Image: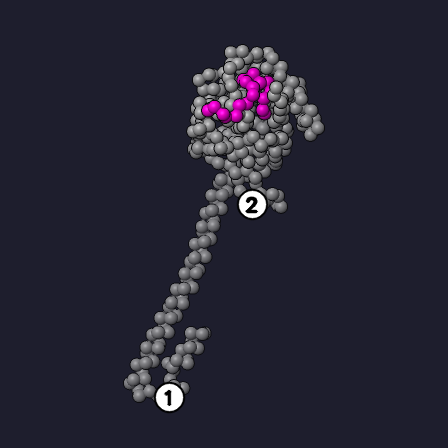
């Protein structure tokens, strides 16, 4: 018997200013506001997904770690549960989709029931879970989200140990439709829950890109499904429960964020340009300060050389003129000291 855990990950209608705060790349408070909580990273790079996995982030994509992903969700009125380990999205202004990564350390999920997945029962479970999550949405004043049916029926790849399905959803009266394309990658100590959220009309173009990105995902050595050894923690349920309930399953995500993604990406690019200009200004200022400092030392050096020259001339005069009284010599040490002080 497993406990059904419902989670509401819904993107409500948020003013653009909120999204701007979420993607500002600098840490400088703006008009008394808090420093930006999200540190975006640009591909190409290899990003860590918690302690058990990693993904290749290609050029043209941006990534935030678990902390950044949680802040991103929270700033957009989405509850979090600590399982978030990353967020990936295209940087292009022409793209409007994103991927959330969550790791559930539920233990090893056996796939013995892979040939007996009941799609109708699973869909009903997801619908009920999402409607239950709508109670929380209502409490927070957020728009409800509903599951309308399968986009892709659930299927399991016994070679890669990936469980995949996709559902269609929307707000009331079919507003703001979204597809949740979900992949559960089974590992030794739990599952990596990967959810692609996008507009249904973009599915044909984005699905092959998403699958290509998933080719760059992997559990690290010792965390793969094949690394299981006797004595490891067991999840206590199989694939059916992983969809229908399990840990962190069920409640769907909406795709309202897509409406503002162009603004987010544009601001991200603008911030990089601003930082580059700011850095150049800092370098220029540093050069001016250094020039001033070196100029002061140059003048000091010239003054010292002049002083040495005067002292040398004074010494020669004393030899040739049989050392007149010090008070009557224009090149005396007393006069020289005053000259330097002046």
State left or right for residue 281 relative to residue 255. left
Asked whether 166 falls inside the magenta stretch, the response is no
Q: Nearer the viewer, mark 2 or mark 1?
A: 2
Q: Secondary structure at mark 1?
A: loop
Q: Secondary structure at mark 2?
A: loop
Spatial distance from mark 2 to mark 1, Cα to Cα?
68 Å
Residue 33: percent from left, percent from top: 62, 43
Q: Which residue is mark 2?
A: 28
Whichever of labels 2 and 1 marks the residue nearer the N terminus, that label is 2
Instruction: Give the residue displayed 38% in from the left and 67% down from the top.
Output: 301
Task: Identify the main secondary structure in magenta.
Answer: loop
Front-most of residues 22 and 20 = 22
Front-most of residues 39 and 226 = 226
Instruction: Give the residue displayed 47% in from the left and 50% down from the top.
Output: 282
Q: Picture quarter containing residue 288?
A: bottom left
Residue 286: percent from left, percent from top: 45, 53
Instruction: Give the residue displayed 61% in from the left and 21% down from the top.
Output: 2
Instruction: Give the residue displayed 49% in from the left and 20% down from the top.
Output: 162
Q: Which residue is mark 1?
A: 325
Asked whether 232 falls inside the magenta stretch, the response is yes
Q: Is residue 17 above or below residue 186?
A: below
State left or right for residue 169 relative to residue 295. right
State left or right for residue 188 relative to residue 13. left
User: Is the N terminus in the top left, top right, bottom left or bottom right quadrant?
Assistant: top right
Q: Hey, which residue is sitting farthest front in the picture?
A: 231
Stretch of the chain drawn in magenta = 229-248
Q: Is residue 125 visible?
A: yes
Q: Is residue 263 visible?
A: no
User: How many C-alpha atoms fall within 10 Å of the one at disc 1: few (<14), some, or many (≥20)?
Assistant: few
Q: Hey, which residue is sitting farthest left in the picture?
A: 320
Residue 191: percent from left, percent from top: 52, 24
């Amino acid at each position: 018997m497993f406990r059904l855990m419902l989670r509401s990950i819904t993107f409500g209608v948020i003013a653009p200013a909120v999204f701007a705060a979420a993607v500002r790349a600098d840490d400088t408070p703006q008009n008394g506001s808090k420093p930006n909580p999200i540190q975006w990273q640009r591909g190409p790079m290899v990003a860590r997904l918690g302690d058990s996995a990693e993904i290749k982030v290609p050029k043209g994509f941006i990534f935030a770690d678990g902390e950044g992903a949680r802040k991103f969700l929270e700033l957009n009125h989405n509850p979090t549960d600590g399982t978030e380990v990353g967020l990936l999205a295209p940087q292009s202004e022409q793209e409007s989709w994103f991927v959330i990564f969550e790791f559930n350390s539920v233990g090893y999920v056996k796939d013995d029931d892979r040939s007996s997945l009941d799609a109708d029962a699973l869909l009903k479970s997801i619908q009920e879970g999402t409607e239950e999550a709508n109670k929380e949405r209502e409490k927070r004043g957020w728009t409800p989200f509903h599951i309308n049916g399968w986009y892709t029926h659930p299927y399991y790849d016994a070679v890669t140990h990936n469980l995949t399905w996709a559902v269609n959803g929307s707000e009331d009266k079919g507003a703001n439709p979204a597809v949740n394309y979900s992949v559960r990658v089974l590992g030794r100590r739990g599952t990596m829950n990967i959810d692609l959220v996008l507009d249904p009309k973009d599915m044909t173009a984005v699905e092959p890109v998403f699958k290509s990105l998933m080719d760059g995902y992997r559990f690290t050595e010792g965390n793969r499904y094949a690394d299981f050894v006797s004595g490891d923690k067991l999840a206590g349920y199989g694939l059916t429960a992983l969809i229908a309930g399990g840990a962190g399953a069920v409640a769907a995500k909406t795709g309202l964020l897509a409406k503002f993604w162009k603004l987010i990406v544009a601001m991200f690019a603008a911030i990089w340009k601003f930082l580059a200009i700011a850095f150049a200004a800092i370098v220029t200022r540093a050069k001016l300060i250094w020039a001033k400092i070196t100029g002061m030392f140059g003048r000091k050096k010239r003054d010292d050389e002049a002083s040495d020259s005067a002292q040398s001339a004074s010494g020669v005069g004393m030899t040739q003129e049989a050392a007149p009284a010090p008070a009557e010599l224009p090149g005396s040490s007393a006069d020289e000291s005053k000259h330097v002080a002046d």
